[in-house]
Image (cartoon, grey):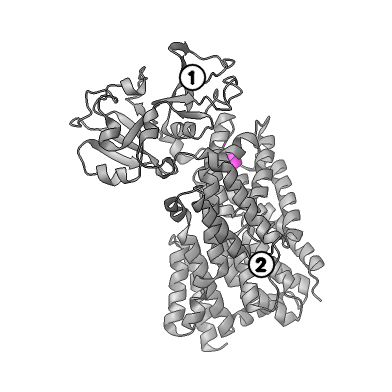
C-alpha cells in the first residue's frame, strides 16, 4: 500500500473506533476525520466537500419539511386513531402498528416518520392499556424495513443511489426498483415481529416515569357546531379513556352534567371540562371538532399556525395576582391567552375567565413564541418555558398535506422527475399552502444528520481516490475464495456490522467504494453489490446506536442495550439471507 492509502485507512479505522467507543456525536467525529484528510492534502478540497452538494443530502433535507407538514396538520394523529384502531391483544397491536408504519415509511423518510409516530404510539398504548415498550421497538424496526422498499424511504438509499450515479456507469434506480428485495424483506420482517415480537420484546418502563409528578390542569373545550363529534356519544367520540386526562363534566347551556356517562351524546356548543396533565391538554387541542372554550384565542394578533403552548408560573408580585383572568386583561397586556390552570393538584371548579389567580399558579398559555423572550427576565412570572411540538393543529390543511405527498410520489413515478426536484417542490408547497410555517420548516431539518452524511461521503471519496478501497476490498474477495455469492455475503455482513456501531449513512458511504471495488475485482455486475450495501446499511436492528430511529425509541421505551440484540439479531440475519439470496437473481452477476 502507498503512504496515502495507509494514511487514509488509518483515519478511517480511527473514525470507526471513535464512533464505537466514544459518546461524541457522529457528525463531529466524521467531520474531524474529513478535516484531517483535507488538511493533510490526501484528499482534494473539491472531492472532500462534494458531499455538501450531494443531491441525496438536499433531498433528505426537503423530505424533513414534507414530514413536518404532515405532522403539523395532525395527519399522523388521524392515522393513529383511525388506522391503528382498537387491538384485542398485544400481538394484534403489533400487527396493526407494523403494517401501516412500514407502508408509510416507504414514502416518508423513516427518521421524521418515527419522530412523528412516537407520541401517537405513546398515547395509543396508554389509551388501550398496552406496554409502550412492546410497541416502540417494532415501530422503529417496521420503519426501517419499510424504508427499504423505495428509493425515498431512507436516507441510505438516496445516498447510495447518488454515489452509484456519480462514481459508476450504472443508471439511477427507479423509485420502486429496490422493492424486488426490500418488499420480501419487509413482509418477512413484519411477520417475525408480529409472531415473536410480543414474546421477545421485554416489558420496560421509561426511566422518567418513575420520577414524574405531573401537574393537573383544568381546561375547557367547546364542541364546534360544525364538528363531526356532534351527535356521537362520549364513548364513540373517543373522549372516555383519554390518556392522562378525564372528562370531569359537561356544561350544556348552563345545565351541569357531572360524572359523565359514556353513552351521553354530545351537542353543538357543549362546554367540556377536562382535568389532566400538560401533554393531555396539548392532545385535546389536536382533536378535530374541539375548540378552545375561550374566544380570546381567536382574537390574538398572530395567526394560530405560528403560535405555541407556553407554561408560566405566576409570581407573588405579578399584576395579575388577585384578579380573575378576565379582569386581568391577559390578552391585551401579554398578547397571550390562558388555556388551562394548574394549582397544587387542586380541581378549580370555575370557568377559565372566572378563575382568580394566586401566586404559584401554573398557567398554560397559547401565544407567539416571542412571548418567551419578552417575559423571561420580567418579574411578572417566576418561570417561562415553551412546550415543544405544541403548535395549534391545522385540521383544514390535512387533506392538502396528503395531496402534496401523493403529488410528490406521482411526480417521481409518472413524470420521471428526480427525487430532489420532487421533494423540493413538495417542501415548498408545504410552506406556501400553510401546512407548516417557515419557522417550523427550518426547525424540522436534522442538520446533524445531514452534516454526518456529507462528511461520510467525503471520507468515502478519499478511500476511492487513494485506492485504499480497492486494497481493503481484496480481503472479502480472498475470504470468499473468489466466489461472487460468498463475496456478496461477506460484504453484507461487514456492512451490517459496521452500521450497528456507527450510523447507517456513514456505513453506506464508507462501504460503497469497498463493495464496488470487490465487484470490479471479480469482474461481475455491480448492481447486486449496490443493493446489498443499501439493504445492509439500513438493516440495523441489533444495537440502539446503529440507526437514528433505534436511538429515538431507546429512552421512551425504557430499553436496555441487550434488548436490541435479543430481538434484532435474528431479524438482521433474516434480512441478510433474503438479500443475498434474491439480489443476484434479480440482477445477475453476469
Residue at 32%, 46% in the rendered image: 370
Name the chief secondary structure element in magenta.
helix
- Label 1 neighbourhood size at 10 Å, few (<14), some (14-19), many (20+)? many
Q: Position of residue 160 (x, y in %)?
A: 62, 68
For the residue pair 343 and 478, the one nearer the viewer reads as 343
Indicate yes or no whether the magenta region holds residue 133: yes
Q: Identify the mark at residue 533; answer none if there is no mark.
A: 2
Q: Secondary structure at mark 1?
A: loop
Nearest the viewer among 180 and 82 is 82
* Precedes in sequence: disc 2 or disc 1: 1
User: Is residue 202 visible to the viewer in this orientation of the structure?
Assistant: no
In the rendered view, would you say 498 is above or below 398?
below
**Left or right, residue 355 beside residue 589:** left
Picture quadrant of residue 472: bottom right
Q: Which of the image's four quarters has the C terminus?
A: bottom right
The magenta segment: 131-136
Q: Nearer the viewer, residue 143 or 18?
A: 143
- Is 485 situated above or below 258? below
Find residue 70 and report its horizontal and vertical position in percent: 55, 47
The location of residue 559, given as percent across then percent down, is 53, 45
The reply, left or right, for residue 199 in relation to residue 551 is: right
| Residue at image point 71% right, 52% down | 186
Q: Position of residue 254 (x, y in %)?
A: 43, 12
List the residue tagged with mark 1.
270
Amino acid at each position: 500500500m502507498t503512504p496515502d492509502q495507509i494514511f487514509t485507512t488509518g483515519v478511517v479505522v480511527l473514525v470507526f473506533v471513535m464512533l464505537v467507543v466514544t459518546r461524541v456525536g457522529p457528525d463531529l467525529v466524521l467531520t474531524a476525520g474529513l478535516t484531517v484528510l483535507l488538511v493533510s492534502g490526501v484528499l482534494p478540497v473539491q472531492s472532500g466537500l462534494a458531499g455538501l452538494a450531494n443531491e441525496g443530502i438536499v433531498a433528505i433535507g426537503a423530505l424533513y419539511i414534507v414530514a413536518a407538514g404532515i405532522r403539523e396538520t395532525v395527519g399522523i394523529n388521524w392515522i393513529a386513531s383511525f388506522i391503528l384502531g382498537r387491538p384485542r391483544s398485544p400481538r394484534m397491536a403489533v400487527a396493526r402498528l407494523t403494517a401501516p408504519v412500514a407502508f408509510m415509511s416507504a414514502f416518508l423518510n423513516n427518521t421524521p416518520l418515527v419522530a412523528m409516530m412516537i407520541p401517537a404510539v405513546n398515547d395509543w398504548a396508554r389509551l388501550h392499556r398496552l406496554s409502550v415498550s412492546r410497541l416502540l421497538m417494532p415501530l422503529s424496526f417496521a420503519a426501517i424495513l419499510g424504508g427499504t422498499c423505495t428509493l425515498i424511504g431512507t436516507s441510505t438509499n438516496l445516498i447510495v443511489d447518488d454515489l452509484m450515479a456519480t462514481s459508476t456507469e450504472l443508471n439511477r434506480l427507479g423509485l420502486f426498483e429496490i422493492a424486488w428485495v426490500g418488499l420480501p424483506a419487509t413482509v418477512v420482517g413484519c411477520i417475525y415481529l408480529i409472531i415473536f415480537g410480543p414474546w421477545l420484546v421485554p416489558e420496560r418502563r421509561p426511566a422518567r416515569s418513575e420520577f414524574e409528578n405531573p401537574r393537573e390542569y383544568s381546561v375547557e373545550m367547546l364542541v364546534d357546531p360544525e364538528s363531526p363529534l356532534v351527535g356521537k356519544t362520549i364513548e364513540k367520540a373517543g373522549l372516555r379513556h383519554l390518556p392522562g386526562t378525564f372528562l370531569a363534566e359537561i356544561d350544556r347551556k348552563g345545565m351541569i352534567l357531572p360524572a359523565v356517562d359514556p353513552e351521553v351524546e354530545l351537542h353543538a356548543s357543549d362546554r367540556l371540562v377536562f382535568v389532566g396533565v400538560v401533554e393531555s391538554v396539548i392532545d385535546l387541542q389536536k382533536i378535530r371538532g374541539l375548540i378552545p372554550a375561550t374566544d380570546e384565542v381567536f382574537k390574538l394578533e398572530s395567526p394560530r399556525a405560528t403560535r405555541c403552548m407556553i407554561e408560566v408560573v405566576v409570581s407573588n408580585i405579578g399584576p395579575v395576582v388577585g384578579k380573575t383572568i378576565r379582569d386581568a386583561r391577559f390578552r391585551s397586556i401579554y398578547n397571550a391567552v390562558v388555556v388551562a390552570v394548574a394549582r397544587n393538584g387542586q380541581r378549580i371548579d370555575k370557568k377559565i375567565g372566572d378563575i382568580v389567580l394566586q401566586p404559584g399558579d401554573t398557567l398554560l398559555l397559547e401565544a407567539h413564541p416571542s412571548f418567551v423572550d419578552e417575559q423571561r427576565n420580567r418579574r411578572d412570572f417566576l418561570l417561562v418555558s415553551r412546550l415543544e411540538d405544541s403548535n395549534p393543529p391545522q385540521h383544514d390543511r390535512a387533506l392538502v398535506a396528503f395531496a402534496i405527498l401523493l403529488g410528490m410520489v406521482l411526480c417521481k413515478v409518472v413524470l420521471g422527475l428526480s427525487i430532489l426536484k420532487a421533494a423540493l417542490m413538495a417542501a415548498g408547497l408545504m410552506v406556501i399552502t400553510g401546512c407548516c410555517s417557515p419557522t417550523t420548516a427550518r426547525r424540522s431539518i436534522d442538520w446533524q444528520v445531514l452534516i454526518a452524511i456529507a462528511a461520510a461521503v467525503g471520507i468515502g471519496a478519499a478511500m476511492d481516490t487513494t485506492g485504499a478501497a480497492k486494497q481493503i476490498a481484496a480481503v472479502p474477495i480472498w475470504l470468499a475464495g473468489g466466489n461472487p455469492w460468498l463475496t456478496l455475503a461477506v460484504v453484507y455482513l461487514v456492512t451490517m456490522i459496521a452500521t450497528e456501531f456507527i450510523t447507517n449513512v456513514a456505513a453506506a458511504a464508507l462501504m460503497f467504494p469497498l463493495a464496488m471495488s470487490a465487484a470490479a475485482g471479480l469482474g461481475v455486475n455491480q448492481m447486486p453489490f449496490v443493493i446489498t450495501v443499501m439493504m445492509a446499511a439500513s438493516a440495523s436492528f441489533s444495537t440502539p446506536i446503529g440507526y437514528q430511529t433505534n436511538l429515538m425509541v431507546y429512552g421512551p421505551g425504557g430499553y436496555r442495550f441487550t434488548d436490541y440484540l435479543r430481538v434484532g439479531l435474528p431479524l438482521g440475519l433474516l434480512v441478510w439471507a433474503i438479500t443475498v439470496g434474491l439480489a443476484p437473481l434479480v440482477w445477475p452477476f453476469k
